[in-house]
Image: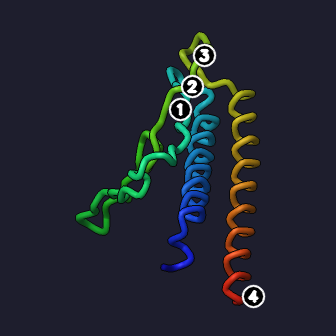
Amino acid sequence: MPISGLPILDMLRTKMQWHQERQRLLAENIANADTPNFRPFDLTPPNFDRPAMTAPNVALQRTSGAHMAGGNSTGAGAFQTASPRGSETRPGGNAVSLEDEMLNVAQNQMDFQAAAGLYAKSLGLVKSALGKR
């Protein structure tokens, strides 16, 4: 079994991918803070209890090189989006709270750094156990 196939490393890698996608979605929310009728989105945390986390990511097929690469307009990729609860709507219909979004960005960054640190330490322990260090 390859080192990358260990369940703990796979879960940490999934968690880091979730944080990357959440960062992109939070940045999109901040970028649309002045867009009328825009509703912010967030990602639901990954559930590591179900075995379906390894489902393949299906991408759009380009039939011509002149076509633009397809993007996921809802932002989630392989993760599920959810509308944040309790968001206040301004008179223009926009429900983005910059304070809340910036707090989410900071928390997301700290959580990503923690997961990346755990991944690096776990990989170092496995290499040490194999005598590869």
Circle 3: residue type: Gly
Closer to the chain start, of discs 1 and 3, is: 1
Q: Quadrant of the C terminus?
A: bottom right
Specify the farthest residue to the front: 129
Could you say where residue 55 lies in the image, as x and y percent from the top left? 37, 56
Mark 3 lies on a secondary structure that is loop
Label 4 to label 1, Cα distance in Å?
Answer: 43 Å
The residue mark sitting in front, 3 or 4, is 4
Q: Is residue 104 above or below residue 117?
A: above
Instruction: Identify the residue at horizontal 56%, vertical 50% (top origin).
Output: 18
Label 3 to label 2, Cα distance in Å?
Answer: 7 Å
Instruction: Identify the residue at horizontal 74%, vertical 68% (top origin).
Output: 121
Could you say where residue 48 lies in the image, as x and y percent from the top left? 51, 48
Could you say where residue 99 lies in the image, as x and y percent from the top left? 75, 27
Rendered image quadrant of residue 73? top left
Q: Residue under circle 3?
A: 86
Circle 2: residue type: Pro
Label 1 to label 3, Cα distance in Å?
Answer: 12 Å
- Asked if marks 1 and 2 touch (Cβ < 8 Å), the reply is yes
Rendered image quadrant of residue 80? top left
Label 2 to label 4, Cα distance in Å?
Answer: 45 Å
Q: Which mark is residue 84?
A: 2
- Asked if marks 1 and 3 touch (Cβ < 8 Å), the reply is no
Q: Is residue 55 above or below residue 22?
A: below
Q: Which mark is residue 120?
A: none
Q: Residue under circle 4?
A: 133
Label 1 to label 2, Cα distance in Å?
Answer: 6 Å
Q: Residue under circle 1?
A: 41
Closer to the chain start, of discs 1 and 2, is: 1
Label 3 to label 4, Cα distance in Å?
Answer: 50 Å
* 119 sits left or right of 56 in the view: right
- Asked if marks 3 and 2 touch (Cβ < 8 Å), the reply is yes
